[in-house]
Amino acid sequence: MRSFDILLSESVERHGHLCAGQIIGVRMAMLGCRLVGINEPGSEQHRKKLIVYVEIDRCATDAIESVTGCRLGKRTLKFKDFGVNAATFVNIDSFASVRVISTERSRELVKKYAPDEPGHYQQQIKGYKLMPDSELFDVQKVKVMLPEHDMPGPPRQHTECRRCGQMVRDGKEMVLNGESLCRVCGGDGYFEVLDTVEL
């Protein structure tokens, strides 16, 4: 794997600025990949062998995407909106899987690693770089249920919503009262339609 400094520099360039989340995300990705046996994530050899589930839509997720090469559009990055600074790394050849969680104790431990820094933000920037993995992260060996329709590649299933006619791919439809529905028609939408727009 390339060095932490190179991976952090690339991640910061993509993300737009250096922050504590970038450092945590780069280190989390490096550790997760190593633990599941992916040495060169994003390389041609490993590009389709890694799936990462991220549990928060914050800075660390951009770093994880940068380091691993996993992308939503390639179906190798999965988002679970749990609000936890954690990610699960799955080697889809061996099915070795680990969940790496950023510890809350690390927020206070930065003082130990960067006592001379003037503010908490600067302590985090320096401290998260120096802190050992064992203090920055908790790691769980996990088993991830990977349904066939969640794997990378073309859609394995298409279902037409019986109410609006939208095509729902990859088994994401709902079945209510015997009807196959898209999530919106099934009551799980994040918006309310106000009107249609003529083009």
Image (tube, rainbow, N blue to C red):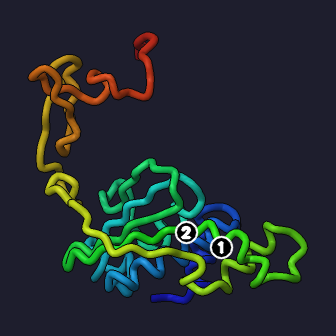
How packed mark 1 is, by other alpha carbons closer than 10 Å (few <14, some 14-19, many 20 or more), is some
State yes or no: discs 1 and 2 in contact (Cβ < 8 Å). yes
Q: Confirm whether residue 165 shows in the render.
A: yes
Judging depth in this view, the residue of 134 and 93 nearest the camera is: 134
Tell me where residue 129 appears, x and y as whole percent: 67, 82
Judging depth in this view, the residue of 123 and 108 nearest the camera is: 108
Q: Is 139 located above or below residue 184 in the figure?
A: below
Q: Which mark is residue 168?
A: none
Q: Which mark is residue 106?
A: 1
Q: Is 40 located above or below residue 25 in the figure?
A: below
The N terminus - image quarter: bottom left
The tally of labels here is 2
Residue in view at x 31 percent, y 67 percent: 51
Tell me where residue 74 appears, x and y as whole percent: 31, 59
How packed mark 2 is, by other alpha carbons closer than 10 Å (few <14, some 14-19, many 20 or more), is many
Q: Confirm whether residue 13 shows in the render.
A: no
The residue positioned farthest toward the left in the image shown: 178
Q: The residue under label 1 is which amino acid type?
A: Ser
On the rendered structure, is 124 left or right of 103?
Answer: right
The C terminus - image quarter: top left
Residue in view at x 38 percent, y 67 percent: 88
Tell me where residue 127 appears, x and y as whole percent: 72, 80
Give the residue number, with chain letter if any, for mark 2.
102
Judging depth in this view, the residue of 2 and 95 nearest the camera is: 95
Tell me where residue 86 appears, x and y as whole percent: 48, 63
Judging depth in this view, the residue of 70 and 138 nearest the camera is: 138
Q: The residue under label 2 is which amino acid type?
A: Ser
| Quadrant in which residue 68 is drawn | bottom left
Q: Which secondary structure, mark 2? A: strand
Residue in view at x 17 percent, y 42 percent: 171
